[in-house]
């Protein structure tokens, strides 16, 4: 079953056509997801934007990497986890709002994306994670930033 869009979707996004809530189309970080994918709450699945699933996939990848980062820096691990989770939460909450409220949540999500980018830069300079992992995470953040930037204006 496909979901019905009740508001205008920016050109760069398309409706999610799956009813199971599995993260379709985001192969770069799917190894971070639990077996069988994950299910989103009803109020989130009614919003057919792949951006929320992409943000959730990013958050799951960060949470999976947190124990490894924590070995070198507990503060960096905790801050990165909080910022990554904030992206998904604010995009989800903003999707249920309208007008200035929606924009407010999208701006917060955009700020959290920038925070994650800065934290990954520090983690990269300390050689805490492999370069390919940093590259994959940064690439996903760049995609999230591009879409969220369009949403907030």
Image (tube, helix red, strand yellow):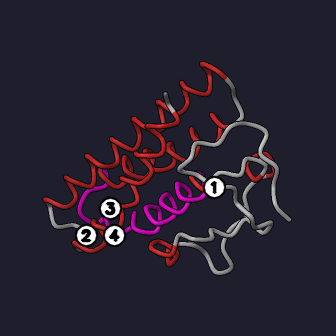
Residue 55 on image: x %, y %: 52, 54
Gap between marks 2 and 1 measured at Cα: 32 Å
Region rendered in magenta:
52-75
Residue pointed to by mark 3? 70
Q: Answer above or below: position of 33 versus 150.
A: below
> Of the residues tagged 2 and 1, which is closer to the observer?
1
Rendered residue at 79%/45% (across/down): 43
Q: Which residue appears at 63% of the width and 55% of the height?
A: 14
* Gap in angstroms between the C-alphas marked 3 and 1: 36 Å
Chain-order first, disc 2 or disc 1: 1
Residue at (79%, 39%) from the top-left corner?
Answer: 6
**Residue 129 tag number:** 2
Residue sitting at the far top: 100
Q: CA distance from mark 3 to mark 4?
A: 5 Å
Of circles 1 and 4, which is in front? 1
In primary-sequence order, the first of circles 2 and 3 is 3
Q: Residue at x 71, y 52 (%)?
A: 48
Q: Position of residue 3 (x, y in %)?
A: 81, 55
* Vertical comparison of 102 with 49: above or below: above
Give whichever of 50, 83 is nearer the camera: 50
Q: Nearer the viewer, residue 130 or 152?
A: 152
**Mark 1 or 4, nearer chain start:** 1
For the residues marked 1 and 4, what is the alpha-carbon distance in whole angstroms?
A: 34 Å
Marks 1 and 4: CB-CB under 8 Å? Answer: no
Secondary structure of residue under mark 4: helix
Is residue 22 left or right of 138 when viewed as pictured?
A: right
| Number of numbered discs | 4
Please, what secondary structure does the residue beneath circle 1 have?
loop
The residue labelled by disc 1 is 14
* Residue that badge 4 annotates: 68
Side of 81 relative to 88 (left or right): left
């Amino acid at each position: 079953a496909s979901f019905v869009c009740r508001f205008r979707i920016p050109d760069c996004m398309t409706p999610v056509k799956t009813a199971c809530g599995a993260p379709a189309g985001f192969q770069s970080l799917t190894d971070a997801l639990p077996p069988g994918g994950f299910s989103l709450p009803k109020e989130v699945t009614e919003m057919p934007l792949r951006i929320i699933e992409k943000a959730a996939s990013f958050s799951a990848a960060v949470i999976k990497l947190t124990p490894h980062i924590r070995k070198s820096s507990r503060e960096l691990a905790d801050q990165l986890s909080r910022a990554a989770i904030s992206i998904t939460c604010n995009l989800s909450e903003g999707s249920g709002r309208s007008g200035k409220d929606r924009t407010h949540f999208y701006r917060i999500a955009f700020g959290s994306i920038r925070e994650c980018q800065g934290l990954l830069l520090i983690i990269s300079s300390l050689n805490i994670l492999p370069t390919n992992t940093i590259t994959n995470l940064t690439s996903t953040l760049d995609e999230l930033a591009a879409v969220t930037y369009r949403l907030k204006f």
